[in-house]
Image (cartoon, rainbow, N blue to C red):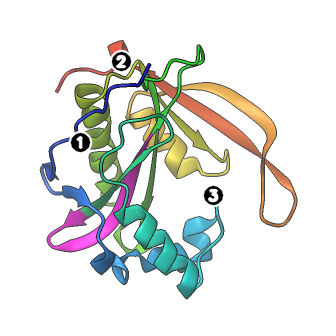
Amino acid sequence: MTPPVLAPPALPIRTERLTLRHVSLDDLDALRYYTDPEVCRYLPFPAADEEALVKRVATMAGRRAPSLPDEVLSLAVVHEDTLVGDVILRLRTRADGATAPSVAEIGWAFAPEHAGRGFATEAATALVDVAFAHYPLHRLIAHLDPRNTRSAALCERLGMTLEAHLRRDWPEADGTWTDDLVYGLLREEWPAR
């Protein structure tokens, strides 16, 4: 059976201070924070060189209308005409092998010069709203390195529950292994906004 194709969410999304919109190729310079080793320290990929950054932005710009498991929605987070970060929603398969996505993973990255202003919380809250309002999701998850205390705090502000601490579960670029925290949020735990 062919799964139904879901319509893309209505964009842009506007919050009190932010606009969430599709990433475009014109965002290359603004997304240079992906070349910063400190920004990428807890991400599942190393800091990008110029060639890798061009490819990454092209990939992000193509992530516009996820409908099937493992497809991704990438959104630029803009404050006063300045791209300050980005958020993603990756659709996942259900454990029973069903084709309609019922679980999704959320993630975020923000330029260091815009940190500490609540933008990540505001953008992630809007993304969770879209995830539960637009997609037939049962739950959301977030994976993060336990050393990433700022992202753990963000998960908690979103109302997510720490569900697992997987020891030495994620390979590092240097060949070592790091732990993986799994946070989760069920549809019924997310208040309608």
Secondary structure of the residue carrying numbered label 1:
loop
* Any part of residue 81 in sight: yes
Q: Earlier in the sequence, mark 1 or mark 2?
A: 1
Circle 1 or circle 2, nearest the eye: 1
- Identity of the amino acid at label 3? Tyr
**What residue is disc 1 on?**
8
Q: In 3D space, how far apart are the residues under numbered discs 3 and 1 (Cα atoms)? A: 29 Å
Q: Are marks 3 and 1 in contact (CB under 8 Å)?
A: no
Q: Position of residue 119 (x, y in %)?
A: 30, 56
In this rendered view, identify the residue nearer to me: 2 or 30. 2
- Identity of the amino acid at label 2? Arg
Circle 3 or circle 1, nearest the eye: 1
Q: Position of residue 173 (x, y in %)?
A: 78, 65
Which residue does the image show at 14% across and 70% down from the upper left?
A: 80
Q: Residue furthest front?
A: 1
Which residue does the image show at 51% across and 40% down from the upper left?
A: 70
In this rendered view, identify the residue nearer to me: 51 or 138. 51
Q: Position of residue 111 (x, y in %)?
A: 41, 70
**What residue is disc 2 on?**
187
Secondary structure of the residue carrying numbered label 2:
helix
**What residue is disc 3 on?**
42
